[in-house]
Structure formats: structure tokens, C-alpha cells
Image (cartoon, rainbow, N blue to C red):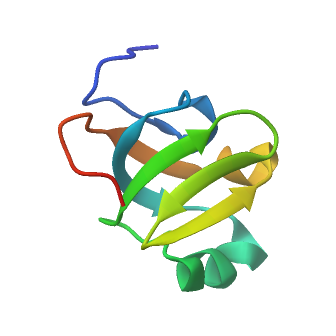
């Protein structure tokens, strides 16, 4: 799998300190809850802590999410952007 900064991948694969943008949220029944927290296409994120649960800064909020959910959030890492 290509690990370049422009490759789309699961949020769960990002390391602590990663920054980027959300591409899509494919979590079925939790989609609306995640979108209400800011996990929407185009929104910037910063991984404050990787692992399970992971801690993500998004839309001026710090959110802890399980790895199984983060596996279904597709992102593009962009280290040059300001964090969320």
C-alpha cells in the first residue's frame, strides 16, 4: 500500500501527529453521529494519539473513537495544513 502523503487511507492507520482532511465516512448507523462531531468530507483533522481508542482533534473538538470506527473513516494526510 502506498504510504505517500497524498494516498487515501483509513484514519486508524494514521500515526500520532498526523494531519489531513476527511475524504469519506462509511460507518453505517454511526455516520450521523460522526458527522455531527465534525467528521465530514473536507474537514481538517489532527491525530492527538493513535491506538485504541484514538484521539482526534477536529472542528475545535477533541474526540476519542474506537479503532473499528476509525477503520471506516477515509482520509488524506496533508502534513502542511494547520491542524483542526
The image position of residue 67, as x and y in percent, is 77, 43
- Looking at this view, name the residue that lies furthest to the left: 80
Q: Quadrant of residue 84?
A: bottom left
Give the side of residue 65 with respect to residue 20, left or right. Answer: right
Residue 72 in view of the camera: no
Kindly identify the residue that appears in the image at 69 percent across and 64 percent down.
Answer: 27
Give the side of residue 24 with respect to residue 76, left or right. Answer: right
Q: Quadrant of residue 45?
A: bottom left
Kindly identify the residue that appears in the image at 20 percent across and 46 percent down.
Answer: 81
Residue 12 in view of the camera: yes
Number of callouts: 0
Q: Is residue 72 above or below residue 63?
A: above
Q: Is residue 72 above or below residue 1?
A: below
Query: Between 52 and 41, which is closer to the camera in this rendering?
Result: 52
The image position of residue 37, as x and y in percent, is 57, 79
Give the side of residue 42 with respect to residue 80, left or right. Answer: right
The image position of residue 26, as x and y in percent, is 60, 62
Q: Quadrant of residue 20?
A: top left
Kindly identify the residue that appears in the image at 26 percent across and 34 percent down.
Answer: 79
Kindly identify the residue that appears in the image at 57 percent across and 53 percent down.
Answer: 56
Amino acid at each position: 500500500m502506498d504510504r505517500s502523503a497524498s494516498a487515501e487511507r483509513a484514519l486508524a492507520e494514521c500515526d500520532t501527529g498526523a494531519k489531513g482532511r476527511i475524504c469519506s465516512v462509511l460507518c453505517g448507523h454511526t455516520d450521523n453521529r460522526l458527522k455531527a462531531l465534525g467528521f465530514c468530507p473536507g474537514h481538517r483533522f489532527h491525530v492527538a494519539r493513535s491506538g485504541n481508542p484514538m484521539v482526534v482533534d477536529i472542528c475545535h473538538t477533541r474526540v476519542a473513537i474506537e479503532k473499528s470506527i476509525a477503520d471506516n473513516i477515509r482520509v488524506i494526510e496533508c502534513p502542511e495544513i494547520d491542524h483542526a
